[in-house]
Image (cartoon, rainbow, N blue to C red):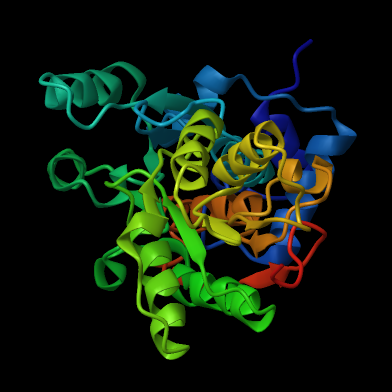
Amino acid sequence: MRVRLEDVARKAGVSPKTASRVLNDEANVTEATRQRVRAAMEALDYRPLPSARSLAGNRSFVVAMLYDNNDNPASTYLAEIQDGVLEACDEHRYSMMVRPLRMRGDDFVRRLDALISDHHPDGVVLTPPITDYEPLLRQLKERNVPYASVSPVQHDRAIGVAMDEQQAARAIVGHLLELGHRRIAHVIGIADHGASRWRLAGYREALAAAGIEEDPALVVQGGFTFSSGVAAAHELFALEHRPTAVFAANDDMATGVMWAAGEYGLKVPHDLSVCGFDDTPLARQLWPALTTVRQPSREMGKIAAQQLLNVLRGQGQGRLVQIPFALQIRGSTAAAP
């Protein structure tokens, strides 16, 4: 016979309502009571039906992670964030769904409404660049759907997680300057991303602090993808005075630059130093390994989801958590030739 929640409550010596609160991870339950109910669930091998849990709490226990499908859906950055969100959801027995949501689609509002109406997510985690897309934020507020953001531009009104990417970019370009490089190129990410703006600003700040005038020919548009890194590198290597170092706005593009360097017969780092941003697993799998900024994407996804879950579980209003960056100096950078 199937074990019921009432059986759990009886064994734990609490009311069915209290057992339900523990099951739904609600507030206003002491830790001792919570542990006693969980021990009873384990002893009785209690496995609640998801549908019953949802009905009891009038919630779906689903968190949606939304991303702009103009991005590369296979990017390691998004995959790392997704793993972090999933880890946080698993800890609190929430399910996670992942949905692309193209910002510039004519039917954007209709598709967002359909997602909310069809799946009833209790809340959503937003990833760049849609973290600051006003039509999306306005619609979520109108539908009363809580959200948390990864790397939002507007810090004053967001909960979630952020890192000082501008200072991180300045620091890694400073590393190249310390190695004696003066012709340092930058491959920009997608224009709509706050990350692209922050990393470009950090690049410019580092050059200005060193008294180096920016050469517009050394700043090339990319798209956060491997192929865009290759294309940008071709443009840079065709210059009469090519750069001695390239700072790409993410690791995927930096990998493309290193690939193109091989096509041109340039040895990294002997002829060309290359660095990226994010410290994805790819950065450690290259040869030579990539010098980059460690942005702990998985941890950021988990923190953003935790802040959202705090709100959903009545554990406070949530906040924007600031995390530190770290430079990972590896074999792809060396003294200027």
Residue 271: image quadrant is: bottom right
Residue 333 locus on image (x, y percent): 73, 63
| Residue at the right extreme of this rendering | 43
Residue 145 locus on image (x, y percent): 27, 42
Residue 246 locus on image (x, y percent): 56, 57
Residue nearer the viewer, 58 or 19: 58
Residue nearer the viewer, 5 or 169: 169
Instruction: State how many labels appear.
Output: 0
Residue at x 69%, y 78% (from the top left corner):
179
Q: Is residue 15 left or right of residue 7?
A: left
Measured along the vertical axis of the image, is residue 251 above or below residue 119? Answer: below
Residue 147 locus on image (x, y percent): 34, 49
Residue 43: image quadrant is: top right
Residue 293: image quadrant is: bottom right
Residue at x 51%, y 18% (from the top left corner):
51
Residue at x 51%, y 50% (from the top left corner):
305
Residue nearer the viewer, 315 or 288: 288
Which quadrant of the figure contains the C terminus? bottom right
Q: Is residue 241 left or right of residue 180?
A: left
Residue at x 46%, y 40% (from the top left corner):
232
Q: Is residue 155 left or right of residue 210?
A: left
Which quadrant of the figure contains the N terminus? top right
Residue nearer the viewer, 301 or 30: 301
Tell me, yes or no, if residue 20 can be seen here: no
Tell me, yes or no, if residue 91 can be seen here: yes
| Residue at the top extreme of this rendering | 1
